[in-house]
Amino acid sequence: MKKHIISPLDLTCGEIEELLHLSARIMENPQQFAHKCDGKILATLFFEPSTRTRLSFESAMLSLGGQVLGFSSANSSSTAKGESLSDTVRTVECYADIIAMRHPKEGAATVAATKLECPLINAGDGGHQHPTQTLTDLLTIHQLKGRLDNLTIGLCGDLKFGRTVHSLIRAMMRYTGIRFVLISPPELTLPEYIRSDLEAGGFPVIEAERLEEVMPQLDILYMTRVQKERFFNEEEYLRLKDSYILDTDKMRLAKEDMIVLHPLPRVNEISTKVDDDPRAAYFKQARFGRFVRMALILKLLEVE
Ligand code: NCD
């Protein structure tokens, strides 16, 4: 396995399969893994807000018997004094065995990893990639649908800035029989560099502006939040923020066994009434995030 995980493509399909298998073993018998990382330290360096990613990383390491340290905002680290990212991570490496880092700039994880000896996991770099959310998504899909191939997946909302969407598409492109349905306003369509990869790979891509039109075809609906923090213009955000709201009426159009995923946090894009629908899987998804991160830490530290 590669030392650093910056994009989901840093893992082969075989490695992903192993990680999902290991996650399932951990879920079945967590006790068996409770001391695998005794004496190891994970550093979580979060230069951007987070609830699930940071806490699930920390919960993962604590569940393995390891310990955690870190910071949850840029202004509580020496970044506020003008320290470079590269110096910060080289320092943290003196105190930890593995690093999970989130940063608002695209490419930050690649830059941070260049001089690093210990493994670095990208926990989100701007609007670019978020590989461990993708592992969480893949584990959820595998657990709930029983497969990672032959699926029609609808991605809805902010496809332009949503890094979880970019990473999930990259990962799903490697499985057979995947159909992507892209649902977004024209202002928030998928970046050209990902779209051209889809075209080059000969993937069937359907684009739609209205969710209702495509709902009946979907096996998975992946909802996303409009990424307020990536907008240059607040007015534009306010105009687009409620482009899609999944409600119980729209759910009536969907297959009985469709699942609704969302990396969370949700703002307005899924009505809380949908939470009671058995097809709503986003809180299960959040739960899976802890186990897949346990599996990843074990593999990167070569404990398992
Ligand atoms: C996502 C992120 O940070 O990209 N959240 C997460 O990690 N679960 C999605 C988002 O913030 O909208």
Image (cartoon, helix red, strand yellow):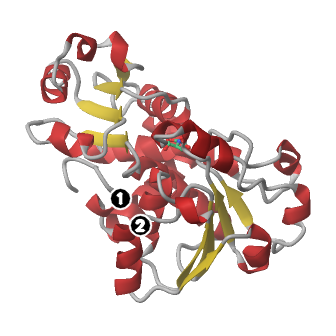
Of residues 259 and 292, the one nearer the viewer is: 259
Horizontal side, residue 212 vs residue 80: left or right:
right
Q: Which mark is residue 8?
A: 1
Where residue 265 sits, quadrant-wise, is top right
Residue 194 at x, y percent in the picture:
38, 69
Does residue 31 lie above or below 260 as drawn? above
Please say if the residues under marks 1 and 2 sit with CB atoms less than 8 Å apart: yes
Kind of residue at badge 1 = Pro
- Label tally: 2
Seen from the viewer's position, the closer of residues 209 and 127 is 209
Q: Callout 1: helix, strand or loop?
A: helix
Three-letter amino acid code at the position of disc 2: Ala
Cβ of mark 2 under 8 Å from ligand 1: the answer is no
- Residue drawn 20% across and 21% down? 92
Placement of the N terminus among the 4 image quadrants: bottom left
Picture disc at residue 21: none
Where on the picture, by quarter, is residue 15?
bottom left
The quarter holding residue 137 reads bottom right
Q: Residue at x 41, y 66 (%)?
A: 171
Q: Which residue is mark 2?
A: 171
- Residue 21 seen in the figure: no
Residue 71 visible (yes or no): yes
- Local packing at callout 2 (Cα closer than 10 Å; few below 14, some 14-19, many 20+) is many
N-terminal-most mark, 1 or 2: 1
- The x and y percentages for residue 140 are 59, 57
- Marks 1/2: CA distance? 6 Å
Q: Up-down: is 265 above or below 92?
A: below
The x, y position of residue 104, in whole percent, is 36, 36
Q: Is mark 1 within 8 Å of ligand 1?
A: no
